[in-house]
Amino acid sequence: MVPYQYRCTGCGDVDVRRPMGAATPRTACPRCGAEARRVYTSPGTRLAAPGLVAALDTAGASADRPQVVTRDPAPRTPRPAHPLHARLPRH
Ligand SMILES: [Zn+2]
């Protein structure tokens, strides 16, 4: 069930829950029974968890505005060579 928003002349904006895609342009107001007209709103995509929204925003921004690295964030220390590498042929 999905909430669809309707506007009743007496009650103002009211939500009516219907199966997805089953909203009609007009319906009876659930409070007073008068005719209410559907109000078209943006989908409730911002109802996701705030952390998820922030992660999606960051991922989307990286495509348009990638962060620029000005220095090596973690300088690497050379790994110690394996003793058997000394026995490998040299060119
Ligand atoms: Zn009403």
Image: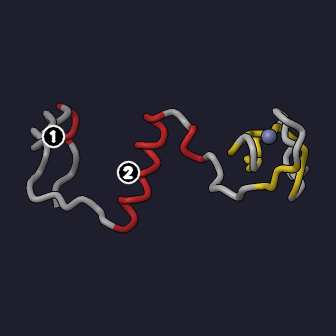
36 or 67, nearer to the observer: 36
From this viewpoint, which residue is outermost toward the bottom? 64
Q: Residue at x 87, y 41 (%)?
A: 18
Task: From the viewer's perspective, tell me whether residue 51 is left or right of residue 70.
Answer: right
Rendered residue at 71%/58% (across/down): 40
Q: From the viewer's perspective, is residue 41 above or below residue 46?
A: below
Judge by depth and name the residue closer to the eye, 75 or 13: 13
Ligand 1 is found in the corner quadrant, namely top right
Q: Quadrant of residue 41?
A: bottom right
The residue wearing badge 1 is 86
Mark 1 or mark 2: whose residue is earlier in sequence: 2
Q: CA distance from mark 1 to mark 2?
A: 46 Å
Kind of element beneath mark 2: helix
- The answer to whether the residue bearing label 2 lies less than 8 angstroms from the nearest atom of ligand 1 is no
Q: Quadrant of residue 82?
A: top left
- Going by the image, does 80 lie left or right of 25? left
In the displayed structure image, the side of residue 89 where residue 64 appears, left or right: right
Q: Is residue 55 above or below residue 38?
A: above
Camera-side residue of 81 and 70: 70
Quadrant the C terminus occupies: bottom left
Quadrant of res 31: top right
- Residue with the mark numbered 2: 58
Under mark 1, the amino acid is: Ala
Amino acid type, mark 2: Thr
Mark 1 or 2: the one toward you: 2
Of the 4 image quadrants, the one containing the N terminus is top right
Q: How is the image coloured?
A: secondary structure
Secondary-structure class at tag 1: helix
Query: Residue, x 65% and y 52% (percent of image)?
Result: 43
x, y percent for residue 12: 69, 44
Image location (x, y in percent) of residue 7: 74, 50
